[in-house]
């Protein structure tokens, strides 16, 4: 039996508001039944307001690239990325498990997106929607969708097909 892929959700930005944190806590706890899941908040670059957007993205990108390990599978959330249905997301997780991926990093970039160097390093770019969401809400959506994908993989009732 393969060890399930460890999943980390990385996000640049501030702590969650209490109501967002409550929702994340629910799905985070549920996810622990299936896989090792954690959220890593990457603090905003110091004096970000004084930097140009390209420079800010570049500095955020350097932090991310320094944190990544060579064997990490990086799924970058980007508006130009591939869209997936819940069933496709579940299949993607199954593929990562079958491939022996040890750690899947799901990355939410900063306020102005993800630096091109990080996007080049990404194994896959995914778009959640054509809509724009606040980063805190994206953390909740991604956590819930990962849980939903695992319920699909385990033939549980949560996701109605």
Image (tube, rainbow, N blue to C red):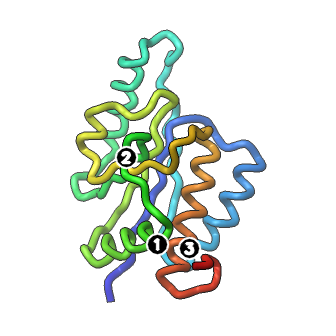
> Which type of secondary structure does the marked residue at label 2 adopt?
strand
Which residue has dot 1 on it?
Answer: 87
* N-terminal label among 3 and 2: 3
Residue 146 numbered mark, or none: none
> Which type of secondary structure does the marked residue at label 1 adopt?
helix
Which of 150 and 68 lies nearest the eye of the viewer?
150
- The x, y position of residue 133, in whole percent, is 60, 40
Residue 81 numbered mark, or none: 2
Q: Nearer the viewer, mark 3 or mark 2?
A: 2
Which residue has dot 3 on it?
Answer: 32
- The x, y position of residue 4, in whole percent, is 39, 77
- Residue at the right extreme, as displayed: 19
Left or right: residue 10 compared with residue 143:
left
Q: CA distance from mark 1 to mark 2?
A: 17 Å
The image shows residue 61, relative to residue 67, as above or below, that is: above
**Residue drawn at x 40%, y 51% as measured from the top left:** 126
């Amino acid at each position: 039996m393969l060890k399930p892929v460890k999943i980390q959700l990385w996000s640049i930005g501030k702590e969650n508001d209490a109501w967002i944190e409550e929702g994340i806590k629910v799905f985070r706890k549920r996810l622990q039944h299936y896989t090792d899941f954690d959220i890593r908040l990457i603090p905003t670059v110091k004096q970000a307001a004084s930097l140009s957007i390209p420079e800010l993205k570049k500095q955020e990108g350097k932090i991310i690239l320094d944190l990544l390990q060579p064997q990490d599978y990086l799924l970058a959330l980007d508006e130009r990325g591939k869209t997936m249905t819940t069933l496709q997301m579940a299949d993607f997780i199954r593929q990562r498990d079958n491939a022996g991926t040890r750690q899947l990093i799901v990355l939410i970039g900063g306020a102005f997106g993800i630096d091109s160097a990080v996007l080049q390093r990404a194994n896959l770019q995914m778009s959640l929607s054509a809509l724009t969401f606040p980063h805190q809400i994206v953390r909740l959506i991604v956590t819930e969708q990962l849980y939903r994908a695992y319920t699909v993989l385990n033939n549980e009732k949560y996701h109605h097909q």
